[in-house]
Amino acid sequence: MPTIRNIVILTGAGISAESGIDTFRSEGGLWERHRVEDVATPEAFARDPDLVLRFYDMRRAAIQTKQPNAAHRALARLDAAWPGDLLIVTQNVDDLHERGGARRVLHMHGEHLNAWCTACDARSPWTAPLLHRPPCPACGTSALRPDIVWFGEMPYRMDEIHAALRQADLFVSIGTSGAVYPAAGFVRGARDLGIPTLELNLEHSKGSAWFDETRLGPATEVVPAWVDQMLASV
Ligand code: OAD
Ligand code: ZN
């Protein structure tokens, strides 16, 4: 195997599932209980802002009661000890990677614990509800929305992600169903660049066939085991 220095890790809802945060597409998942078109599009926000704000207020409150699990902590352990570059690109809008101790985390779908002002464009750390239309800390206007990338909107930090992939020696995908682009396309991008690809997931994802290797199991088991293997190679 060629020497691995730089690692890009993509994570999805599956890594936070054992922390008690709902995934989107599993049985009983969030998108079974809520219609995407009602709560996760700019059109929904324009049509019924109270419904959308209430949905995200509940989710924002919920994640603050959850704790990082062994998979988040294992990635932080790898981050601390790995001699090359390690970047975690997450589709998750929770902060469990950070609370688990990871250093470089890029939230391509936004973050529950940020509010985004549609008047002045400022982003502010936010833990409270938004339903009562609090003023923006930067400009005072009551025009805050969740800093979440809704369907039809452009994911964040794509240039940085592509740049990191071009420098990567290994691409690892953890706990994502491969249903949402552009994240679902990273594996094919990595393959085109000749980078080895590994998937860690509870079950086969839509993109499993694209990976060089897939290891199935709960994140709290397969992720620490993979991290131990990587660290043993250092
Ligand atoms: P999904 O809910 O689509 O997929 C979660 C994946 O995690 C599935 O493949 C499960 O099999 C797997 N999984 C479940 N429990 C697991 C466990 N304990 N250990 C390991 N894997 C487990 O979530 P994402 O792929 O993250 O976007 O969804 C992508 C995007 O779609 C989300 O970021 C969200 C959603 O719409 C926005 O809200 C912008
Ligand atoms: Zn503002």
Image (cartoon, rainbow, N blue to C red):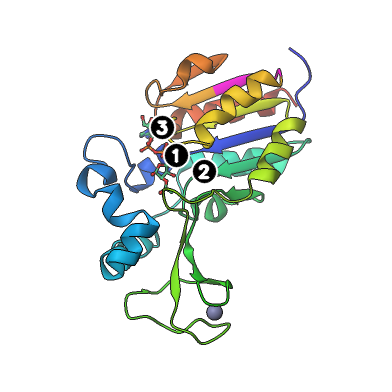
Is the residue marked 2 within 8 Å of ligand 1, measured from its CB? no
Query: Does the residue at mark 1 contact the one at mark 2 (Cβ under 8 Å)?
Result: yes
Quadrant hosting ligand 1: top left
For marks 3 and 2, give the one nearer the viewer. 3
Splitting the image into 4 quarters, where does residue 57 fall?
bottom left
Q: Mark number for residue 15?
A: 1
| Residue at the disc numbered 2 | 72
Q: CA distance from mark 1 to mark 3?
A: 16 Å
Splitting the image into 4 quarters, where does residue 205 fall?
top left
Which amino acid type corresponds to the residue marked 1 in the rendered image?
Ile
Which amino acid type corresponds to the residue marked 3 in the rendered image?
Ala
The residue at 26%/55% (across/down) is 38
Is the residue marked 3 within 8 Å of ligand 1, measured from its CB? yes
Q: Is residue 150 above or below residue 2?
A: below
Q: Mark number for residue 179?
A: 3
Dot 1 lies on which element? helix
Residue 122 appears left or right of 184: right
What secondary structure predominates along the stretch shown in magenta? loop
Q: CA distance from mark 3 to mark 2?
A: 22 Å
Q: Is residue 203 above or below residue 159?
A: above
| Quarter of the image where the C terminus is located | top right
Q: Is residue 128 magenta?
A: no
The residue at 37%/74% (across/down) is 130
Of labels 1 and 2, earlier in sequence is 1
Give x and y (percent) for residue 187.
57, 25
Residue 207 appears left or right of 81: left
| Residue stretch rendered in magenta on the structure | 194-198
Which amino acid type corresponds to the residue marked 2 in the rendered image?
His
